[in-house]
Amino acid sequence: MPDREAAWLVEIESAIVSIDTFTAGLEKQVFLADERTCAATAMFLVVMGEAARRLPALVKAEAPEIPWALIVSLRNRIVHGYASIDHEICWSIVQDHLPVLLAATRRMLATRGE
């Protein structure tokens, strides 16, 4: 695998770790009330979407359980409609979907010796 593909996987992993750090121990209402944490989370969701957009289909096929197109769509939604981001949806993504994406990303990196 070319280094750039590993780099995009690392970007996804790093973004998830950052989001986990920002949101660790927070309850939903505290998250929603914290504009800075919401903005930082949205930014790292954008980073993840951009990296996912750049991954070739063959790499994405290694983790068919991941909705890659939805990750890219979320990136587009945030970038082009920042003022109308639904932070409750972001919270749900953080809680319900990022752990699965993190596990898949780490598995994909491990198969590459990363």
Image (spheres, rainbow, N blue to C red):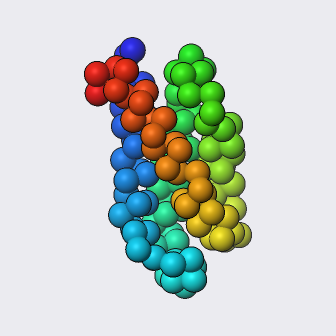
Q: In the picture provided, is 15 more to the left or to the right than 96?
A: left
Which residue is located at x 37 percent, y 16 percent?
2
Camera-side residue: 20 or 6? 20
Q: Is residue 112 above or below residue 93?
A: above
Q: Residue 99, image x and y in percent? A: 49, 50
Camera-side residue: 66 or 42? 66
| Quadrant of the image containing the N terminus | top left
Q: Is residue 60 above or below residue 19?
A: above
Which residue is located at x 62 percent, y 44 percent?
71
Answer with the quarter of the image where residue 5 lies.
top left
Residue 4 seen in the figure: no
Residue 67 seen in the figure: yes
Answer with the quarter of the image where residue 22 lies.
bottom left
Which residue is located at x 45 percent, y 40 percent?
103
Which residue is located at x 51 percent, y 83 percent?
30
**Number of marks drawn:** 0
Q: Residue 11, image x and y in percent? A: 39, 41
Q: In the picture provided, is 92 more to the left or to the right than 2?
A: right
Q: Is residue 95 above or below residue 66?
A: below
Q: In the picture provided, is 35 more to the left or to the right than 21?
A: right
